[in-house]
Amino acid sequence: MPRSRNKVASHRRRKKTLQRAKGMYGASSKLISVAKHRVDKGLQYAYRDRRAKKRTMRGLWITRINAAAREHGVSYSRLIDGLNKKNIDINRKMLAEIAVSDHGAFAEIVKLATQ
């Protein structure tokens, strides 16, 4: 009796790996053994960086808020402390968006926080 091999499933699995490796440089997109390692590593990076992106975005928002707050003569930490003491609940993402797009509204928020 001949040996049974599941060619359909094997082919689909390899095709899926090569499809994910599309656009990679050199052998990484052509040879299944190299592509498999690169795809696995790429998925690890994607998993890690989905979490890292949240940290870097928060840092960006804080930088923008600090820059806008200093234009109004107050530091970031004093602004956030003032907002917390006044029970003004606004997250850093929205505060940064207001700081960039609507200077008048941000000035009002700073005034409320520093009174």
Image (tube, rainbow, N blue to C red):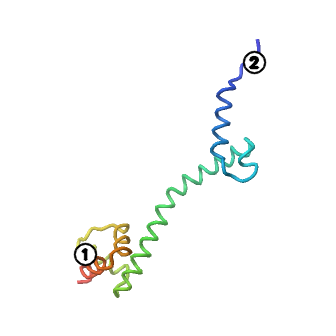
Furthest residue in direction top, as rendered: 1
- Residue 41 image label: none
Q: Is residue 86 left or right of residue 79?
A: left
Residue 57 location (% of width, % of height): 46, 66
Mark 1 or mark 2: whose residue is earlier in sequence: 2
**Front position in the image: 48 or 34:** 34
**Front position in the image: 77 or 53:** 53
Which residue corresponds to the image point at 64% horizontal and 50% vertical from the top-left? 41
**Front position in the image: 66 or 21:** 21
- Indicate whether 64 appears above or below 71: above
> How would you rate the neighbour count of disc 2 (Cα within 10 Å): few for under 14, some for 14-19, many for 20 or more?
few
- Indicate whether 77 appears above or below 48: below
Residue 23 location (% of width, % of height): 66, 51
Q: Read off the residue under disc 2.
A: 3
Asked which secondary structure carries label 2, the reply is loop
Q: Read off the residue under disc 1.
A: 85
Asked which secondary structure carries label 1, the reply is helix
Query: Which one is in front in this view, the residue at disc 1 or the one at disc 2?
Result: 2
Q: Disc 1 residue type? A: Lys
Q: Quadrant of the C terminus?
A: bottom left
Q: Disc 2 residue type? A: Arg
Q: Is residue 70 left or right of residue 41?
A: left
Inter-mark Cα distance, 1 to 2: 75 Å
